[in-house]
Amino acid sequence: MCEHCTRREFLGTGAAGALIAAGTTWAHAWASQSPPPRTRGKSRICVVFTGSPVPTDRNWGADVTQIEAMKTRLAKAERDLGNVELVMGQSSSAQETAALLKKAGPEAPVLVSNVQNFALTRVVQPILDGSHPMVFFSLPASGHDWMYAPRWHNRGHRVTLLASSDYDELERALRLLRVIPMMKQTRIILFPPARGTAPAQSPDKVKERLGADVVAVEEDAFGEMISAAEEGAVRDEINSWTKNAKEIVEPNREDIRKAAQVSVALQNLMEREKADGLAVGTCMGWLPKGFPCLGFARLRDKGIPAACEGDMDSLLTMILFQYLIDRPGFQGNATFDTARNALWTAHCTAPLKMDGPEGAEAPYLLRGHSEVGGSGCVPEVQYRLGQAVTRAKMINLDTILASPGKIIEVPPKSVHGCRSQIVTEVRDAANMAANWSSVLETEDAMTLLHRVVFYGDHMDSVHHLARLMDMKVVEEG
């Protein structure tokens, strides 16, 4: 246990020691069973237009012009996303639907669009019988079939409805559908112990429910990677962080060097393992070798989610949203100010590029870690005022906690709490605080406390994703 720790002390040294011992057992149990990295392919999605085009001046249905507009927009989305492959066709019978599904593959999710009144209801059965996740894109006046989508979902099918005239919704449909096959190709690196809800801590449960592999890494082996970090790469990392910082407050040169060396080693580890996510359960004990906080920020900015304190629920949440919106998340602790109807989120690591890998970096300071006497080097990121956000966390592999908000304050230099901080206006802070984590059956502080914040209002997409993945949504506040 880290001799400098403060927040963890309330857990008690006995509990902490038990966690570390359990983590060691976990690592030995799984290291020998680690699956090899997989070759990633594009996520194949079956696109089905049901029925035949109708004349432009009569009947309920879509005409040729609308169908061509949909195909053009889908082709653009396929190019822009880069990691989906569309198997597209028309179906006027259950047999034709089955043939398209066979071509796409037995696990391919499905995007359907009805172009003739009641055509979908006549041809949909193979999709439902095969348990394919399905998004139904329904143009206005394209038929009455849209009203069956909620009924199919209520019967246990993974179906959701996008009823809209906006062709850009077709790209959102592909983003939603690709999450499931992408999760099945996901490889997660864990420095034990894992934390969070019991199902999220179990590699078997994660594999069974989401398809992702969780691979344990021994800290001793990683220590060798830190020592082997190439000097030039470390120097570049130091220069990048120091040159772009608004201010360097507590860290000295050695603090920055250690943190940069760990950052380079973490990037090398993820590249070597061909991994898509990282959780470190022992980060509070890393001060002697350098905190991983700069490395976490760098990985998230590159589209590789990384979670503090071994929080597998937060990590899996970040991975889901990364696949959905191509944006990183800010994992943090919560604290309320009901006088301002506000919720704070704070942590000592945070991504700089909340708009995604191609976005601009947020301003930041370099600070010492707030809970170890100002030692080490971590980023204090200053996020965008007025920005709409979504706060979320998947728990127990079957429920998504979610709430919207807006950033109303970012301190110029944090004092209390962890370094990176945002204050967000929420719907009802008093109600939110009174019912915080009430659906969780645990007393573990980190599991109760953590949420992940993403730029943008994605509440609607959260509900769509939950329907496709057979999950529940609990809106907080």
Image (tube, rainbow, N blue to C red):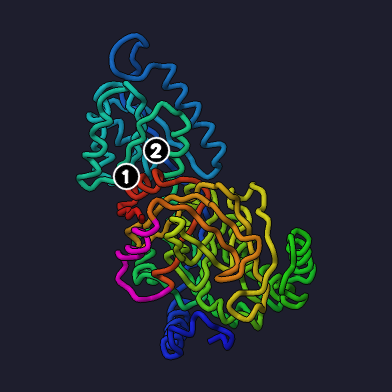
Specify the segment rendered in magenta.
429-445
Name the amino acid, label 1.
His
Which residue is farthest bottom?
Answer: 14
Does the magenta segment cover residue 55?
Answer: no
Local secondary structure at mark 2: strand
State whether residue 224 appears in this view. Answer: no
**Image side of residue 291 versus residue 186, left or right:** right
Please say if the residues under marks 1 and 2 sit with CB atoms less than 8 Å apart.
yes
State the image coordinates of residue 440 (x, y, percent, origin top left). Answer: 32, 67
Q: In the image shown, does 335 or 180 lie closer to the viewer?
A: 335
Query: In the visual, does 17 lie left or right of 239?
Result: left
Q: Position of residue 454 (x, y in %)?
A: 51, 53
Asked if residue 306 is positioned above or below residue 153 in the image, the reply reads below
Q: CA distance from mark 1 to mark 2?
A: 10 Å
Q: Residues within 10 Å of mark 2 (few under 14, many from 20)?
A: many
Q: Disc 1 designates what residue?
A: 132
